[in-house]
Amino acid sequence: MINRKYPSTRLRRLRQSKTIRDLVAENTVSSNDLIEPMFLVNSKSDAGPVNSMPGVERFEKDQLFREIEESIKHGIKAFAIFPVVPSDLKDESGSYALSADNFLINFLREFSERYPDVISIADVALDPYTSHGHDGILANDIVINDETNELLGKQAVLLADAGATIVAPSDMMDGRIGVIRSALDANKNKDTIILSYAAKFASSFYGPFRDAVGSKTNLAGASKKTYQMDVRNSDEALHEVAIDVDEGADIVMIKPGMPYLDIISKVKEKFQMPTFAYQVSGEYSMLSKAISQGLLDKSVMLESIVSFKRAGSDAVLTYAAKQIAKEIKDE
Ligand code: PBG
């Protein structure tokens, strides 16, 4: 029996110095837990800061490799690369996604040659490539599920062939994990890892990301509520995860992060699967804006990542990855 009585029990005893606090700490964040999302553009003229995301930039290939190099020096070992596709390459069916020498594919190929031990993650979804900004193809303004899955399977194979270590379906079509797993296996990509955006909510916290990749203008106010999850649901998140695990997901992800810590915790407890969380653009921008205006101390960023670990996530995608990795090293 634990003695819970004061004065024999004084919980402050284990808080009196940093050393003892560190020794009894239940959760820590290391650079092994951090994945840095980055934006890739096709030409120098498209590069530059993302206005709604302080400190985040879109980089052209060579600049992006320099940035990645920097982050690797600080201990980051995994990067999620998002293409910012020029509007003249976007169309109704997102066909540029399936062009075997599109600039993301070329980048991934070079990435895997340069850094065979570093992990590259590529989204499987059509939204960066479609003129309407949706994650799949449309018929009568509705995203059609099974036809989209077929394209996603092809997209995943191209990304895997280009050397992506992990493919990450972020589209929320039903059955896509199974389709993608079969397509990968049939094309000699048995070892390609699937990180499923398993419980992805129809959230307004993605706003700045949509600015960054230009899909906000394309969406023109349309929502993704017919495929992304209703923000009011939590049992449904467990249902989504169960299906993705059965279909062959290696890692499951919850997204957004901070407003959905309850979901992370339930998923980890129920499935005991490798579980990641995405601290999305809106969460990042909120915190960094408050920090830059002096409303909050910069330590809130690391505190937010600790909360993900406490909730049960094994790794976190965060735009603050490099900054946090530096902070941990300097501690
Ligand atoms: C695209 C995708 C989105 C994000 C990651 N992949 C946006 C969306 O679903 O509209 C959001 C990431 C962020 O907000 O940081 N399928």
Image: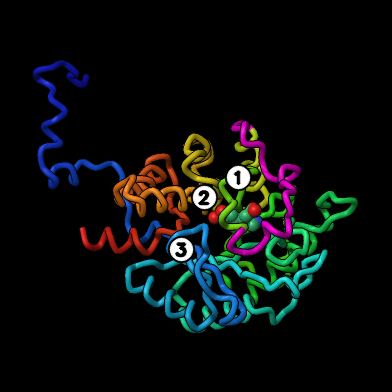
Find residue 296 and report its horizontal and vertical position in percent: 32, 45
Farthest right residue in view? 140
Asked whether 294 or 58 is in front, the reply is 294
Residue 114 visible in the shown view:
yes
Discs 2, 1 touching: Cβ within 8 Å = yes
* Closer to the eye: label 1 or 3: 1
Q: Earlier in the sequence, mark 2 or mark 3?
A: 3
- Return the residue at label 1: 204
Quadrant containing the C terminus in the rendered view: bottom left
Find residue 237 and report its horizontal and vertical position in percent: 61, 38
Q: Amino acid at mark 3?
A: Glu
As helix, strand or loop, the secondary structure at mark 1 comes to: helix
As helix, strand or loop, the secondary structure at mark 3 comes to: strand
Residues in magenta, as a range: 211-235
- Return the residue at label 3: 36
Q: Residue drawn 62% across and 57% down?
A: 210
Whether the magenta-drawn stretch holds residue 212 is answered as: yes
Marks 1 and 3, Cα distance to the nearest angstrom? 21 Å
As helix, strand or loop, the secondary structure at mark 2 comes to: helix
Q: State the predominant SS element of the stretch in magenta.
A: loop
Marks 2 and 3, Cα distance to the nearest angstrom? 15 Å
